Amino acid sequence: MSISSFLTKKFLKSSFFPAHNRGAALPKKLVQLLKNPPGYWDLPELPEIGSPLSQFGLIAKSQREFSDKIGAKRCFFGVNGASGLIQSAVIAMANPGENILMPRNVHISVIKICAMQDINPIFFDLEFSTITGHYKPITKIWLENVFKKLNFDENKIAGVILVNPSYQGYAGDLEPLIDCCHKKKFTCFS
């Protein structure tokens, strides 16, 4: 059975406690606004499904299939939105007391996890558009100049965080930025 067929499976009664009730507790007016029945995917960690950290079950199987498709060693599905995944990536990138290089427009979840884990953020400025009032996407030349200004003897960098696309929707070319980071032997994520 695939995970999608399990999620669309009809159960006689959803009595999962406390909140996993496949959308039954949603306000009726909200349900009427939505095109498809909401909450069919809202299930607890059942043995058939597992969890993102389980070795067995449909989620583990789906994660293995997805990692095979993209050529990755492992893949983990995230819960609780992007903030949890971002924070997991920061923790995987640096140990307490280490430094991570990041632009000033990082998400607040990055700053919070750095504070909680005693990871030192080293912020760099971004080019700013006086026309739009927004930061411009990072370019390879900009990032190279950031690297030139850093004293790597004083600031050992565990990794680099790149924001792409920005919260205003601007996106740059990530490949030259990642190449630039990898030439310095930095782990990076965006």
Image (tube, grey):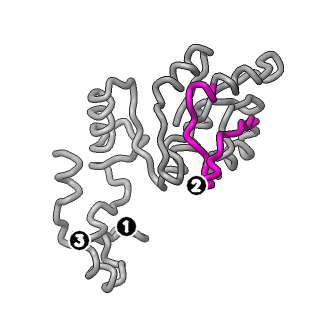
Q: Quadrant of the N terminus?
A: top left
Residue 139 counted in the magenta span: yes
Q: Which residue is mark 1?
A: 20
Residue beneath the point at 29% across and 42% down: 57
Q: Residue at x 69, y 22 (%)?
A: 147
**Is 132 in front, or is 35?**
132
Q: Residues within 10 Å of mark 2 (few under 14, many from 20)?
A: few
Marks 3 and 1, how far apart in space? Answer: 15 Å
Amino acid type at mark 1: His
Name the one closer to the observer, 57 or 131: 131
Q: Earlier in the sequence, mark 3 or mark 1?
A: 1
Q: Residues within 10 Å of mark 3 (few under 14, many from 20)?
A: few
- Quadrant of residue 100 within the rendered picture: top right
Residue 23 in magenta? no
Q: CA distance from mark 2 to mark 1?
A: 44 Å
Indicate the position of residue 73 as horizontal and vertical percent values: 39, 24
Q: Earlier in the sequence, mark 2 or mark 1?
A: 1
Q: Which residues are magenta?
A: 120-143
Residue at the spot 41% in from the left edge and 70% down from the top edge: 19
The reply to whether the C-beta atoms of the residues labelled 3 and 1 are less than 8 Å apart is: no
| Numbered disc 3: secondary structure | loop
